[in-house]
């Protein structure tokens, strides 16, 4: 950006010109134009063909101006090459200025469609190169003014004033770090611009995050418009904070709320803070342990009344819940048809809260139409329908910094006005926010605005689909030779709506899978997804959330003769610099975010093939899973990878781990008190530590949350159950696994592992 004559970012233009298509005097003028542009600080990138220009447009995001020779190829009658470049540019951005370069022989093929896509026409021999270079310079600066969002622009401008500060933070724009060796290393690593943008709320011209004023307020208005909300609030402590803010603005102690049992632990924290009485909505699970949706019929008014009637904590069975929270998408990528959810819950609640932490990109691609909270346009949303809240972790799958989150509010029935909502917001927000996080929020919004959002999301979807197809092609080839390979969790067959032909997923046209949501919708009569009785079209699998499936689990939920526990594959990949999002018994989840590249997923595919080779050869574990062989536990020394996999798989068979897990997460525990009441006892130390073997009939003081994916199995105030309790059985099996397979221990929040024994904080029993 250029502010007050000072440049922060290099100016760059693409010039598409083929000298063989013009007489020498025209070529000389273009050469002079390039020299004049360079003298104004504009770096020029040259391309002499449509293919070359297209490659630059798609791979160089710093291009801020395209000067296109209308006659790239003199032999063409209808300027197909130039039209190809225009199409490529506009598929990515409608805002990058386009100058169409002509000489006096040209112009008869300029249609009104072409004119609409063009910002300026240049007759190279009629205006001076000096003047045209000035027009180029002006166009780039104007483009930057349009694309740099409010707070980012304000901070860029503030940085150019070079003012001394007498306010916090104490490092004073990074100067303090220069006074020690370690500080200097810190300064040099992050760079001066980042540190200069770490500012205090004392800088009044930047506005206030707590008051939502000035450039920060304008930034939030900008984000609201981009994401389709009536209001938006920037959050600098993740969507966990966002969930807590929304809940505290909507419900209070003694109020009733409907809570997706599939919710993140921050919802548990919100329940504790508010003192709300929760009634849980039970999600489904399939044969692979993949967490499914809360079925639509479960959300009907009659079913909600039944759930409240069965809730021991709901003493007034006629009291209406005020709030409902739904996780969209689920951790494994199942997305709801949101209008159906709203319609089903309309009779029960006035406010619906969609936790869309992992789903911030949905609005920007037509594939996800009506499958996100802020569907449609804010001004078209009927005010007699429930008010909608959404939480978006802009740092998870958009391009914001960690901790960046966005709250969206769409006012409907019984809204929470800004002044009331902000009281809750201020309880959680910092008076000293990190400004780069706020900037990253609005920059990620700007990146998704207009055609750019569709381009970026389509790229992620395309790469995810290519990876899925590649895995399945390899699997089919190997199966033809009675060999094994991994699979991906998606439909085995898809139907082309144009031809009516049904083809295998791996043979389906890429364009069909990328653009047609029916290829990803769950149908009641389909077997692949394993969610029996699900409503047709209610749920859609998000293609960018790829579950790679291990051999071992049949579609009916039974274990096959041979199987590979996913933890082994995860450990293998980790040693090769590939970190996965989530690992279950037989699946590994990969997220194809905006940062995906062909090289990135190609390396993953290659690593999966290398695992297969190592497994088939039974290569010793210490050579594969550990950086140094000395790190390998004694139990695995000299043991082959296949041998260890077989032992783990036998453990699954002997213990029934997968089935017990499914039972534990689909059986609602008995609530004895609210999470808030249990927390009071925790604070007062009215608790005791209990081993898992003695957990029967104990009441939990803290939640038990197995990772992955961080969904509470037991909530504070719930009973662990008596003999036969699936929760205790599950914990015992996990404890046994941790003892049997060192180095592959489970991460369970709320459980302390001491010398291989699980302990849980419970309320003291009455004497």
Image (cartoon, grey):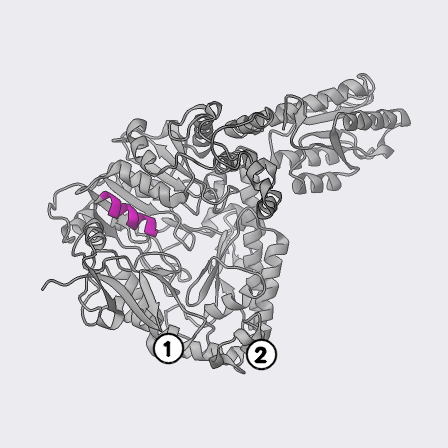
Please provide percent x and percent y for residue 565.
45, 71
Position above or below: 95 against 489: above
In-front residue for pair 176/457: 176
Please provide percent x and percent y for residue 55.
70, 42
Residue on which disc 1 sits: 653
Please provide percent x and percent y for residue 93.
60, 33
Q: Residues within 10 Å of mark 2 (few under 14, many from 20)?
A: some
In-front residue for pair 575/660: 575
In-front residue for pair 36/230: 36
Q: Nearer the viewer, mark 2 or mark 1?
A: 2
Q: Is residue 9 magenta?
A: no
Query: Quadrant of the image for the N terminus?
Result: top right
Q: Which SS does the magenta portion mostly show?
A: helix
Query: Quadrant of the image for the C terminus?
Result: bottom left
Point out the stretch of residues depicted in magenta. 264-274
Q: Is residue 79 visible?
A: no
Residue on which disc 2 sits: 619
Position above or below: 286 against 733: above
């Amino acid at each position: 950006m250029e502010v007050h004559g000072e440049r922060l970012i290099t100016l760059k233009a693409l010039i598409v010109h083929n000298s063989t298509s013009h007489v020498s005097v025209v070529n000389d003028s273009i050469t002079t134009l390039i020299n004049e542009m360079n003298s104004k600080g504009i770096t020029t990138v040259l391309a002499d063909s449509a293919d070359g220009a297209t490659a630059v447009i798609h791979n160089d995001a710093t291009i801020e101006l395209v000067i296109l020779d209308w006659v790239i190829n003199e032999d063409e009658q209808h300027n197909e090459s130039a039209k190809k470049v225009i199409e490529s540019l506009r598929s990515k951005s409608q805002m990058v200025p386009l100058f169409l370069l002509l000489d006096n022989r040209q112009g008869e093929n300029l249609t009104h469609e072409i004119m609409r896509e063009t910002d300026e026409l240049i007759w190279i021999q009629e205006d001076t190169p000096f003047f045209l270079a000035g027009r180029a310079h002006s166009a780039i600066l104007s483009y930057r003014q349009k694309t740099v969002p409010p707070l980012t622009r304000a901070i860029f401008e503030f940085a150019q004033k070079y003012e001394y500060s007498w306010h916090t933070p104490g490092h004073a724009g990074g100067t303090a770090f220069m006074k020690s060796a370690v500080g200097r290393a810190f300064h040099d690593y992050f760079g001066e611009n980042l540190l200069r943008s770490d500012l205090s709320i004392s800088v009044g011209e930047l506005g206030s995050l707590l008051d939502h004023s000035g450039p920060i307020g304008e930034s939030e208005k900008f984000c609201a418009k981009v994401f389709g909300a009536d209001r938006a609030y920037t959050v600098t402590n993740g969507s966990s904070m966002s969930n807590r803010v929304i809940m505290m603005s909507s419900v209070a102690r003694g109020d009733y709320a409907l809570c997706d049992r599939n919710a993140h632990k921050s919802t548990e924290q919100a329940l504790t803070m508010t003192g709300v009485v929760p009634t849980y909505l039970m999600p489904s699970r399939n044969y692979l342990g993949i967490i499914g949706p809360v079925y639509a019929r479960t959300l009907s008014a009659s079913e909600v009344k039944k759930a409240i009637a069965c809730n021991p904590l709901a003493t007034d069975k006629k009291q209406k819940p005020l709030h409902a929270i739904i996780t969209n998408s689920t951790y494994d990528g199942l997305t709801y048809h949101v209008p159906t959810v709203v319609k089903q819950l309309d009779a029960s609640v006035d406010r619906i809260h969609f936790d869309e932490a992992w789903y911030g990109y949905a609005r920007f691609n037509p594939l996800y139409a009506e499958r996100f909270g802020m569907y449609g346009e804010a001004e078209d949303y009927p005010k007699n329908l429930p008010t909608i809240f959404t939480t978006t972790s802009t740092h998870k799958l958009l391009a914001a910094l960690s901790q960046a989150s966005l709250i969206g509010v769409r006012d409907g029935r019984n809204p929470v006005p800004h002044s009331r909502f902000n009281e809750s917001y201020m309880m959680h927000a910092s008076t000293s926010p990190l400004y780069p996080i706020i900037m990253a929020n609005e920059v990620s919004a700007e990146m998704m605005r207009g055609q750019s959002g569709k381009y970026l999301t389509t790229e992620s979807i395309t790469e995810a689909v290519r990876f899925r197809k590649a895995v399945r092609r390899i699997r089919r080839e190997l199966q033809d030779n009675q060999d094994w390979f991994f699979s991906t969790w998606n439909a085995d067959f898809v139907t082309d709506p144009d031809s009516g032909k049904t083809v295998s997923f791996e043979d389906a046209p890429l364009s069909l899978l990328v653009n047609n949501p029916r290829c990803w919708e769950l149908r009641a009569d389909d077997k692949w997804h394993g969610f029996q009785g699900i409503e047709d079209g209610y749920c859609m699998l998000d293609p960018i959330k790829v579950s790679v499936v291990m051999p071992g689990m049949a579609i009916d939920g039974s274990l096959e003769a041979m199987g590979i526990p996913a933890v082994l594959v995860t450990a293998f990949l980790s040693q090769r610099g590939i970190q996965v999002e989530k690992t279950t018994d037989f699946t590994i989840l990969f997220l194809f975010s905006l940062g995906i590249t062909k090289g990135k997923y190609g390396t993953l595919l290659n690593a999966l093939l290398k695992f297969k080779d190592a497994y088939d050869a039974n290569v010793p574990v210490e050579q594969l899973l550990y950086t140094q062989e000395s790190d390998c536990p004694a139990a695995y020394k000299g043991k082959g990878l296949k041998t260890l996999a077989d032992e783990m798989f036998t453990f699954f068979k002997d213990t029934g781990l997968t089935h017990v897990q499914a039972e534990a997460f689909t059986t609602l525990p008995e609530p004895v008190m609210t999470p808030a009441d249990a927390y009071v006892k925790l604070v007062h130390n009215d608790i005791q530590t209990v081993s898992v073997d003695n957990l029967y009939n104990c009441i939990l003081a803290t939640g038990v949350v197995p990772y992955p994916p961080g969904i509470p199995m037991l909530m504070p105030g719930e009973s662990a159950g008596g003999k036969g309790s699936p929760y205790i059985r599950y914990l015992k099996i996990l404890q046994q696994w941790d003892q049997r397979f060192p180095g592959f221990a489970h991460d369970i929040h709320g459980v302390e592992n001491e010398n291989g024994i699980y302990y849980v904080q419970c309320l003291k029993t009455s004497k």
